[in-house]
Image (cartoon, helix red, strand yellow):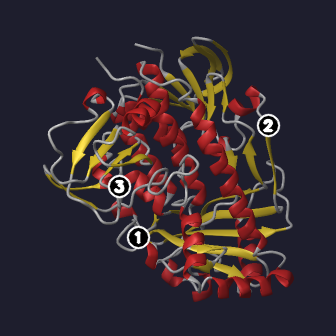
Amino acid sequence: MSDPVIIAGGGPAGLMLAHELGLWGIDSVVLERLPSRSGRSVGQAVNTTVVELLDQRGLLEGLQKHTTPVQGTHFSLLWLDMTPLEGRHQPALLLAQEYLEKQLERHALKRGAEVRYGHELAGYTQDEFGVSVTVRADEETYELRGSYLVGADGEDSVVRAQTGITFSGAGPASCGLVADVEIDIQDLPEIHRGARFCPVGGLYSSVPVEPGVTRVITAEFDTDLPGPSVEPTAAELRGAVARLNDTPFPDVPVRWIRRYGGPSRVAETYQAERVFLVGDAAHTFYPLAGLRMNLVLQDAVNLGWKLAADLLGWAPANLLDTYTAERRPQGLRAAAATDTQLALIHPVEKVAPVRALMAELLKFPDANRYLLELSTGLDVSYAPEGAAAPVGRRLPHVPLVTVAGPGSVASALHAGRGVFLDLTGSGGAANPVAAWADRVERVVAEPVAEIGASAVLVRPDGHVAWAGEPGDATLRPVLEQWFGTPGA
């Protein structure tokens, strides 16, 4: 057995990665500096792609009692027509991040991960065979040996800082507050319910967390974050809400409150030899429409199977290099998309006519669909130049009628392996992926109009690597590109 993968950070990125590694039987140790899970997180919703990522691993089960469907999505609080996604993709959900983290931790532990609370990475060295990590816990230190180190320790990542990877960026100065307040959302004045662009130039949102508790989030611009020694207060929250909504906010108990903000930033690379960055350690930007959590989980799902392939010995050459090559452009794109949305919010005296024009443009179906896919993350593609859809993209999450009975695109990916989806209905006598059976599962199903191909090879992260006829000679080189040489 190889040394475990060491993951610094027990948030969604680190826990999802630990789960992904566990699907392949790879051990991991998650180091979380906090003594316990606090439940104090900005995240309040997950968008379409996050829901589908969770569904494709069977992780939605048990979360439904904490969710409420979101009726739409937006681009800079300009609401988009969701019709193009109906019947093809999952709806976004209101889901507090604390429940998501608990679910990911539960399933990571089930898959063999070890989570150490109150343990913080203090330093590391690496060689050609692995990494040696110094861990601080209870004012003492100890050494831990791992095969790889992954920094999932947030925008102030210690791992990233110690690698020397540049974390540059730009964007408007902003200061946001997030708090859980003890009042039922239905008891708030109507202006304080839901998400809205505020005419003074800022953002406000509120969602129910549980009966009698509402999560309130504010964002104001041209305002720098105070230093970490300046603690936010309930009075500060009420003042921000009153400025944004031009209406006083009730003086109710505040369970907790924290600040967030700063410019968009993206790491210059996501890898330094045997050290990788995922989630907010690799990129950070203002959380809008669930796009930030989208990137966090897509990073973990993209990297997990590639690390497993390397440690299990079947990774093709340069497979690990594709992590930065695929994910960093998506980090840059999401940061740019977010900065564009913020540019449509502030300064208010300049953006009003632009927002009016955008509202007109969104009446055109192509413009609406473009921004809909951008804001949900469904536009992410790893297609080589010249490749036709669906190569590079995620498949629509639609039902399948398989030889074993009813199924779905999501359920076919539960095991975290690659999937060869034969949509001829019969499958024929030959199994073209039989020699890769330890890495790729064959699923035979009836034709599906929404997929538009007779067969597809789907990577473990849900993206299509190949599409064509089941017997095409073009399949084998793609199998070898992503899944290595055939087994014995």
Callout 1 touching callout 3 (CB < 8 Å): no
Question: Between 9 and 21, which is closer to the camera in this rendering?
Answer: 21
Residue 302 as seen in the image, left or right of residue 75: left
Question: Between 232 and 287, which is closer to the camera in this rendering?
Answer: 287
Kind of residue at disc 1: Thr
Q: Report how far apart the C-alphas of labels 1 and 2 lie in the structure.
A: 39 Å
- The residue at the point 57 percent across, 11 percent down is 129
Q: Quadrant of residue 150?
A: top right
Mark 1 / mark 3, whichever is N-terminal? 3
Question: Between 41 and 429, which is closer to the camera in this rendering?
Answer: 429
**What residue sits right under mark 1 in the picture?**
68
- The residue at the point 41 percent across, 25 percent down is 26
x and y percentages locating residue 51 in the rendered image: 42, 58
> Looking at the image, is mark 1 or mark 3 nearer the viewer?
3
Kindly tell me whether residue 364 is visible in this rendering: yes
Kind of residue at disc 3: Leu
Q: Count neighbours of disc 2 (C-alpha within 10 A) and say few if under 14, some if 14 to 19, many if 20 or more.
A: some
State the SS at label 3.
Answer: loop
**What residue sits right under mark 3 in the picture?**
60
Q: Count neighbours of disc 1 (C-alpha within 10 A) and say few if under 14, some if 14 to 19, many if 20 or more.
A: some
Q: Report how far apart the C-alphas of labels 3 and 2 lie in the structure.
A: 36 Å
Is residue 429 positioned above or below 410 on the image? above
> Looking at the image, is mark 3 or mark 2 nearer the viewer?
2
Q: Quadrant of residue 200?
A: bottom right
Q: Quadrant of residue 472?
A: top left
Kindly tell me whether residue 152 is visible in this rendering: no
Is residue 173 positioned above or below 109 on the image? below
**What residue sits right under mark 2 in the picture?**
166
> Looking at the image, is mark 1 or mark 2 nearer the viewer?
2
Question: Between 430 and 59, which is closer to the camera in this rendering?
Answer: 430
Q: Quadrant of the C terminus?
A: top left
Q: Count neighbours of disc 3 (C-alpha within 10 A) and say few if under 14, some if 14 to 19, many if 20 or more.
A: some
